[in-house]
Amino acid sequence: MKLLENKNALITGASRGIGRGIAEVFAKQGANVAFTYNASATAALELEKELQQYGGKAKGYKSDASQFDQAQQLVDEVLKEFGTIDILINNAGITKDNLLMRISEEDFDKVIEVNLKSVFNLTKAVIKPMMKQRSGSIINMSSVVGVKGNAGQTNYAASKAGILGFTKSVALELGSRNIRCNAIAPGFIETEMTDKLDENTVKAWRDAIPLKRGGFPEDVANTCVFLASDMSAYITGQTIHVDGGMLT
């Protein structure tokens, strides 16, 4: 039996990287997948076709999760097309790294807006329909950087740490309605973005991880499947580190 059979999932920022990996694994596990993208319509169309091959419904929506009105409109459109939203995965995110003494106000504000405010926007948009159906699983993508901090990433670390506090608060508010809210804190995950890094730098990172490898989008996706499925029915308000033991 597929773990997400007949469940409808909304995943933000799914046209590449971790988000794409989540969408693919969810489709394999029987979920109908609505996902957002911000730029590449071609990549989104390709992903739609790929996901549909697993037998479920899949549709991409061009939407900027950092904009409150767009988030509300997105949820309305997904509900009209899919009927319900059983799972929300707040995955959209960006980086604009720099040392604090050099970072601009614009770059600080933009990262907070895309990474943290988007989580507020989408969660606020889905909670009414989830409360009505008295069920739902909300999964927020944080980072090990939000737990331990990182030099040159004050904006990113602040946004990802904020997600952890938000997640716990939502879990406390909505638990009585059978709506669960958890966070995932990925470590070094190898995607097309990390492919551009210097090989010696990547090797040093891998060597410092107890499991001696970087993670893959599937590692994060499999954790999302667990948190989205009925197997985690008694888990809420938690942060799961998918980091190969990096913070151990």
Image: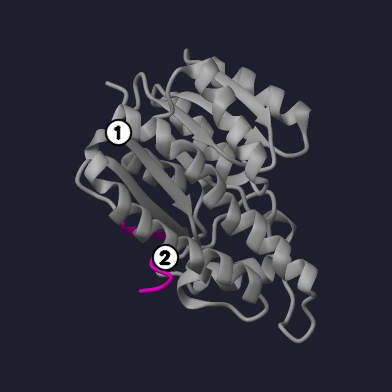
Tell me if I can see residue 240 in this picture: no
Q: Residues under labels 1 and 2: Cα distance?
A: 22 Å
| Residue stretch in magenta | 237-248
Q: How is the image coloured?
A: one colour
35 versus 156 height, above or below = above
Q: Is residue 95 above or below residue 44?
A: below
* Numbered circle sitting on residue 135: 1
Q: Earlier in the sequence, mark 1 or mark 2?
A: 1
Q: Magenta stretch mostly in which secondary structure?
A: loop
Q: Quickly name the residue at label 2.
A: 165
Q: Crowdedness of circle 2 by 10 Å Cα count: few (<14), some, many (20+)?
A: few
Which of the 4 image quarters holds residue 70? top right
Quadrant position of the N terminus in the picture: top left
SS at badge 1: loop
Q: Mark 2 is on which residue type?
A: Gly
Q: Amino acid at mark 1?
A: Ser
